[in-house]
Amino acid sequence: MSYKQFLDKVLPLMSLSEKEVAVLSSPEHVHHAKLSVGDKKFDAWRVQYSRARGPSKGGIRYHPEVNEEEVTSLAFWMSLKCAVTDLPLGGGKGGISVNPKELSVSELEELSRAYIRAFGDFIGPNKDIPAPDVYTTPQIMAWMLDEYEKHVGHHAPGVITGKPLEVGGSKVRGIATALGGVYVLEAAISKLSNVGKRVVIQGFGNAGMTAAKLLVARGFVVVGASDSRGAVACASGLDVEALCLLKGEKKSVSEFSGEGVKVLSNSELLELDCDILVPAALEDSITESNAGAVKAKVVLELANGPTNAAADDILHNAGVLVLPDILANAGGVTVSCFEWVQNRSGDYWESDVIEAKLRKKMETAFSEIWGLYSAADKKHDFRMTTYMYSIKKVLAASHLRGKC
């Protein structure tokens, strides 16, 4: 769902002035550039949607389908995501229309440096802080950091997050998205009755695998998992460690075998009998065509936008609690914020300190939203309650700045 479609759905639920609607409806800045690597040309963007709460924050993705509308929508969502966990940051996003798999390592480095040369005047620790996203890595962030420091002529680790530890990265960042989601899930389960421990994970990539390991360590049982090539299920529980080893060998989870293990299609996986469904892969995985068959009592959205609007209504009416992406996967940007704070202070924290800070942020956000959800007698679904909560926080800062 584009941010404009989303606003068409949520704004009628809120009593906002014309100025407030105008602030929400347009990005502050959209920067576009043509990047060259040898004789190859690429379109690139950096969008700063809102900086009312602080410098804009958001990843840079490398994908052939990147376009201005997508980057702008993602920057809008980042504005809300940073507000949810009360970070002193606004929302931004970047992207290059490229298939990075078609580039050599040297071309990938040159493209990354070209991005910073194009947008270096518009980013910075006090302006806009990029990070990794789809098909970008800590190594790419290191190249970008190096190029930015050449551009400004001084050390500036706080310009970008998601960096390797050796150049100012933060501990816990690699598992932050999944860990934050687990904290939200545990907080939600504490408010519900009769939610069991059987979990299905759709998308066994980095976030999905990490979530599986964290959940198993807490006594949950992963009864189903999938990747782009297929799915497997086992009523008594899958061996998550063995599944991770298989993925490390570049194999599909559908190649996993063992007693009680069944191979399924991806569509069958979403309909598997379970207590908790964790979509951790693609947008629009849960739609009006399959939402009615979802048997989980809780959906934890580690992916961005895995549930479409029509499916939301079906799930809500069926009593399924959807923990929405801007809350459920906000652990990543939250620890990115911690990295930025550490860079600015020069005081680097140990893992236990970061995990405690992350837990507090995620649990506090859930608790405040749950309070609003319950006070309204669950009139709106939990997603809409979360979005309205974050929008009000963005608008509060905009009011204080005299923007609306």
Image: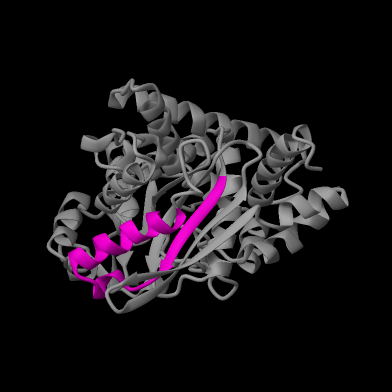
Q: Residue at x 63, y 51 (%)?
A: 383
| Image quadrant assignment for residue 367 | top right
Q: Is residue 338 above or below residue 25?
A: above
Main secondary structure type of the part rendered in magenta? helix
Residue 247 in the image: state x and y as whole percent: 19, 61
In the rendered image, residue 331, in percent from the top left (x then y), is placed at: 44, 40
Left or right of 330: which side holds 77?
right
* Residue 309 visible: yes
The residue sitting at 48% across, 68% down in the picture is: 285
Q: Position of residue 66 (x, y in %)?
A: 46, 70
Q: Residue furthest front?
A: 153
Horizontal relation, residue 135 to residue 315: left or right: left
Quarter of the image where the N terminus is located:
bottom right
**How many numbered marks, from 0 up?**
0
Front one among 351 and 17: 17
Is 95 magenta? The answer is: yes
Residue bounds of the magenta highlight: 91-119
Q: What colouring does the structure picture have?
A: one colour
Front one among 129 and 262: 129
Q: Is residue 278 visible?
A: no
The residue drawn where x is 27% and y is 74% is 38
Q: Which residue is depicted at the point 61% across and 46% down? A: 80
Q: Would you say 87 lies left or right of 347 here?
A: right
Question: Residue 74 lies in what quarter of the image?
Answer: bottom right
Quadrant of image for the C terminus: top right
